[in-house]
Amino acid sequence: MSYSILDLLCLLGAVGLFLYGMKVMSEGLQKAAGDRLRNILGAMTRNRLTGTMTGFLITALIQSSSASTVMVVSFVNAGLMTLTQSMAVIMGANVGTTFTAWVIALFGFKVNMSSFMLPLIGIAVPLLFASSSRNKSIGEFFIGFAFLFMGLDLISKYVPDLQSNPEMFAFLQQYTDMGFGSVLIFLTVGMLLTMIIQSSAATFAITLIMCSKGWISFDLACAIVLGANIGTTITPLLASMSGNAAAKRTAMGHMLFNVLGIFWVLPMFVPFVELNAWLTEAIGQGNPEALYGYVAELEKTQPALYSHLFDNSLPSGHEVMARIGAMQVSVSFGMSLFHTVYNIINLSIMIWMTGVYVKIVEKIIPAKKNEEEEFSLKYIGASLVSASELNIAQVEKEVGVFAQRVDRMVGMAHELLHTKPNTKEFNQLYSRLEKYEDISDRMEREIADFLNRTSQGRLSNDGKRRVAALFNINSEVESIGDACNNFGRVLTRKQQVNVEFNDTIRDNIDAMFVLVSEAMNGMIDMIANIENVKDDVIMAAYNKEREINNMRNQLRSENVQNINSGLYDYQAGIFYMDAVSDLEKVGDYVINVVDTIRDSMTKKHRH
């Protein structure tokens, strides 16, 4: 087998076409679906049954459980799907992957998906010139879909041709008579082979060739199919490495589902293979176990005929060719049936253990301790799927996390007010407040950079409005952090000149903090449900802002009287008003966020 530099460059080009097709398809789908995509995902994963059917249909459509599982990992990473929902989709994907095996079994290796792709591009191109932006997006989706499959076809053409060079696997013959040890060896071979070539369908095809040559028996072919099931989990695992903890847990759940399934099938492997051989005969496809014996006998008794058989020098109508062709169909059906029955039984057992799976992967990949004390973005950063409309949803989630972190700064500032000045506790708390301010600045920059990259992608008009609104919300949330830090600075300057706040000042600032905290809680609740905020909730936010302004005005008027009456000195009054002013600014920033949500983010006002 020779493999040139040109072949390698062609392979890289094929991978590039595949990735570009995935990007165009993904962006076209999201522009066409817009914010409906999240609603569609929610409907498809509402319960275990619909989630499983979703996984099955997506995988049957794109003929790759690895690709569909990577998409699921991406959705979990974006916060669009929960870990529990993703488990059902992944279980369905494992059954969906058997669809490809049936295509091979029913139509042989002659099916060339890329032959359907040029007509699809022909249909799609006129849509690109349609006046409707939705039709343009549908055209992009079809073109991306076509490129994706053309890329897949070219990848299989330019990958080092293991299928046409099965002599690479001839050495495995010496491990076929080790009893149960052979089953484990060939299970491992199936797993490693699928990890390397990233296609359980290609492993299936190679296994069929090995059976046809009489190198391995039907039961060892089934062992390879089992191993291929585990090998497909490597792609989502690699994809999740750059994702968040939820993405890693999803990929780990996929692997566990396939690995744990092995534990129930191995103890009953021989009778299970016999059952599938019987089923294959029962549906009229012959005995899949017969091919191995027939070819082995042919090699022993008629070696010359055996050699001609596999160097394609026998005439196509030869009796032996016809007989082996019929037996190959039987083996192909048997392997497909084994794969399908195994995955359906595995699904039937495992789907009731979804909760257990979630607990196991949460134990294996725990959340980081004191995660809020370190700088990290929870939902955005290394985006697994380049998809602008989904990126907006990720930013919405991230801004919610940002608001919660800044809310903790409000609590720290309040705690600082009641911490004794010039003590270790005061200095530690102020340092923590400053650290949060640094985290806040960096989060604002990272979210803004991500939004900027998103705005350069393909977006619907509604998406563009949401991006502009999120830029504004992000900036206002960061300003709340600045105001909290400024409050801490006021208290630090106060202690440096040995000024004390009396109980009256502290009680009044406490009252301001109560109003500001209520306003913050209202804002955080709005961001959590940003597209469905009710009018009465928005009105309550405006009323709270008026309360904060009225209290600020009242305290400012009383301050002059209190200084004149000697309740506290002038310098204490100055620091007191600075502190009140910083808290009132928090109220202003909160209402700016509320204005933006009302005008640009809620569905009612957007459409």
Image: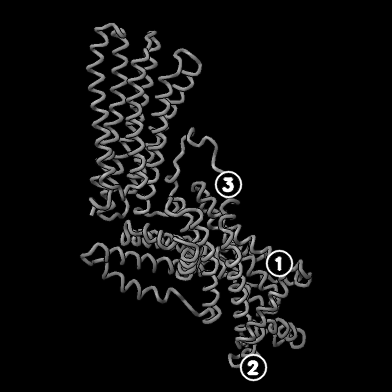
Nearest-to-viewer mark from 2 and 1: 1
Disc 3 is placed on an element classified as: loop
Q: CA distance from mark 2 to mark 1?
A: 38 Å
Count of numbered tags: 3
User: Which residue bears the numbered disc 1?
Assistant: 266
User: Which residue bears the numbered disc 3?
Assistant: 365
First reached walking from the N terminus: tag 2 or tag 3: 2
Q: What amino acid does circle 1 point to?
A: Leu
* Image spot of residue 572 (x, y percent): 32, 11
* Image spot of residue 540 (x, y percent): 27, 39
**Is 140 placed left or right of 163 in the picture?**
left
Q: Quadrant of residue 588?
A: top left
Q: CA distance from mark 2 to mark 3?
A: 58 Å
Q: Between 489 and 305, which is closer to the camera in this rendering?
A: 489
Question: Which residue is at 39% across, 48% downward?
Answer: 394
296 above or below 391? below
User: Which residue bears the numbered disc 2?
Assistant: 319
Quadrant for the N terminus in the image: bottom right
Q: Quadrant of residue 554?
A: top left
Here the colouring is one colour
Q: What amino acid does circle 3 point to?
A: Ile
Crowding at dot 1, Cα within 10 Å, few <14 / some 14-19 / many 20+, comes out as: some
Crowding at dot 2, Cα within 10 Å, few <14 / some 14-19 / many 20+, comes out as: few
Q: Quadrant of residue 502?
A: top left
Quadrant for the C terminus in the image: bottom left
Question: Which residue is at 51% across, 51% downward?
Answer: 240
575 above or below 171? above
**Is 211 placed left or right of 386 in the picture?**
right
Question: Which residue in the rendered view is the most extreme toward the right?
Answer: 178
Disc 1 is placed on an element classified as: helix
First reached walking from the N terminus: tag 1 or tag 3: 1
